[in-house]
Image (tube, rainbow, N blue to C red):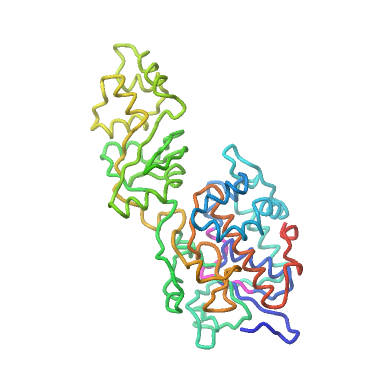
Amino acid sequence: MTEHHGGRRPTVAIVGGGPGGLIAAEVLARAGVHVTVYDAMAAVGRKFLLAGRGGLNLTHSEPPDAFLTRYGDAAPRLRAALEQFTPDDLRAWCEGLGEPTFVGSSGRVFPESFRANRLLEAWLTRLNVLGVELRTGHRWSGWDDDGSLRFLGPEGTVTVGADVTILALGGASWPATGSDGAWLDTVERAGVAVTPLGPANSGVDVAWTPVFMERFAGIPVKNVAVRCEGASTRGELMVTEHGLEGGAIYALSRPLHDQIGRSGGTIVHIDLCPDLDRAAVLARLGRGRPKDSRSTVLARQLGLQPVAIGLLREATANQLPADDSALATLVQDVPVVITGTAPLDRAISTAGGISFDEVDEHFMLRRRPGTYVVGEMLDWEAPTGGYLLQATFSTAVAAARGALARVGGSAADGAQHHELG
């Protein structure tokens, strides 16, 4: 790889056609660099489309300081990238593609269409106009001795030389989209330090009784507070055949995984009436009529849905307390025994990845100058709510700007924030 090109147009190979790879391609192509994106799948953007299946949550609207805390220990390493390409920049970029955004009641940011397909279609049209080449069906298998990239393509093994490479291969939590973590062994063989990949924003396993599982799997438990190991959150749970999923569980991924890793299991405590204090819960239970069953009292006086009452029965072997005081305590502190973590292929995102000590401030591998890594390939994690996509976009933009400087360009050559919108 070289930093001097004798007047010829610099070339960049981007491995991975997800949001990180595509935004890096746009930054570089705007600056006049020849960009080719290689992806193992038959089409690019599959993970982006799947992430938008229930409504594409692009980013979050909370203030920058609070936003940064969502990245935990990795926040100092991500700060500069998040300041280079901010949530406001991402929203402006989205609007520039004809997809204005709005802020939901939870502070999350979505395209007005609420869909990923229209945004991706407009994005690919833009990249085509910019001259970005897309080569699908090309699975990266490492480097040749001369530093060339090696791919297994439709016609066999091919090697590719480029002035700069950006690796944007994602984590391992969406294998059906090509994000399968197969790159891990390749970079480890190159001497790069990697934390083993594991699930983040994942569900947890619970040994439900057959009756509860058959009746309530797939049903949400809305507006609850959940505690684990001193951490707490508000949100929604989803009962599954295997246990629990949903935003309130994903937000506690780190303490849950830590405790499960230490002890093989843990207990979460669920408050089914987080907007009421104990006195209010007790008073409402006291309004029940003598002939009412405990389930009827819970439904009529506290507004609990059948799935919430089912959780109370699970926690008491189907023997709800007859005493109002004991029942009030249970309603606001339902213990659920967690037996394990859902496997990686059922997780929303990935923990682990390439150590930040292996990259410079532009996310270039110190052991392979001219090769950059972005997004979930790096060792960071964040809760759902737009933080995952934002950091993927931001690290990719930062890496692309670093690549421009390396090949003799600059951010001023077409990669300014407003020009991405």
Q: Is residue 40 magenta?
A: yes
Tell me which residue sits at (57%, 70%) in the image: 360
Determine which quarter of the picture holds residue 10: bottom right
Identify which residue, 296 or 273, lies in the foreground: 273
Where is residue 153? Give x, y as percent: 51, 78
Tell me which residue sits at (64%, 51%) in the image: 87
* The C terminus sits in image quarter: bottom right
Identify which residue, 147 or 35, lies in the foreground: 147
Q: Is residue 209 left or right of residue 226?
A: left
Q: Is residue 351 left or right of residue 421?
A: left
Tell me which residue sits at (29%, 12%) in the image: 291
* The N terminus sits in image quarter: bottom right
Determine which quarter of the picture holds residue 243: top left
Where is residue 26? Give x, y as percent: 68, 66
Q: Is residue 379 left or right of residue 212?
A: right
Identify which residue, 341 or 140, lies in the foreground: 341
Q: Which residues are magenta?
A: 36-47
Residue 303, compared with residue 151, is above or below; it is: above
Where is residue 343? Give x, y as percent: 36, 56
Determine which quarter of the picture holds residue 18: bottom right
Tell me which residue sits at (75%, 60%) in the image: 419
Disc tally is 0
Residue 234, compared with residue 283, is above or below; it is: below
Q: Is residue 142 magenta?
A: no
Where is residue 36? Give x, y as percent: 63, 74
Residue 83, compared with residue 188, is above or below; it is: above
